[in-house]
Image (tube, grey):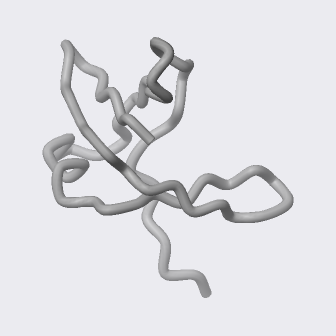
Amino acid sequence: MEDLLKVGVITTTHGVRGEVKVYPTTDEPERFLDLEYVLLDTGKELRRLDIKNVRFFQKSCYLEI
């Protein structure tokens, strides 16, 4: 059994600094502030992406990776 928790879904890219727009699938979107990295499931592998910055706008989070 894997010990992973899905906290969001990437909906689109944003800007030119490597930001992605994420729809949180958790009750506490502030959880993104505590994360140092996320694992992106590409279907073939899990890629580790380090988070540089997090910002919130309406019901979405923007992660700079």
Q: Position of residue 58 (x, y in %)?
A: 19, 13
For the view shown, which residue lies furthest in the front direction?
17
User: Does residue 3 appear left or right of residue 45 in this picture?
Assistant: left
Residue 29 sits above or below residue 23 on the image: below
- Tell me which residue sits at (37%, 41%) in the image: 25
Q: Position of residue 7 (x, y in %)?
A: 38, 50
Instruction: Quadrant for the N terminus, please.
Output: bottom right
User: Does residue 42 appear left or right of residue 38 in this picture?
Assistant: right
For the view shown, which residue lies furthest in the bottom direction?
1
**Residue 27 is drawn in which quadrant?**
top left
Q: Position of residue 38 (x, y in %)?
A: 46, 57
**Residue 36 is drawn in which quadrant?**
bottom left
- Tell me which residue sits at (38%, 35%) in the image: 64
**Residue 29 is drawn in which quadrant?**
top left
> What number of labels is visible?
0
Q: Nearer the viewer, residue 11 or 52?
A: 52
User: Does residue 42 appear left or right of residue 18 in this picture?
Assistant: right
Residue 46 sits above or below residue 42 on the image: below
Q: Nearer the viewer, residue 3 or 34?
A: 34
Q: Position of residue 16 (x, y in %)?
A: 50, 16
User: Does residue 50 appear left or right of residue 33 in this picture?
Assistant: right
- Tell me which residue sits at (50%, 37%) in the image: 9
Residue 49 sits above or below residue 23 on the image: below
Instruction: Quadrant for the C terminus, please.
Output: top left
- Tell me which residue sits at (43%, 42%) in the image: 8
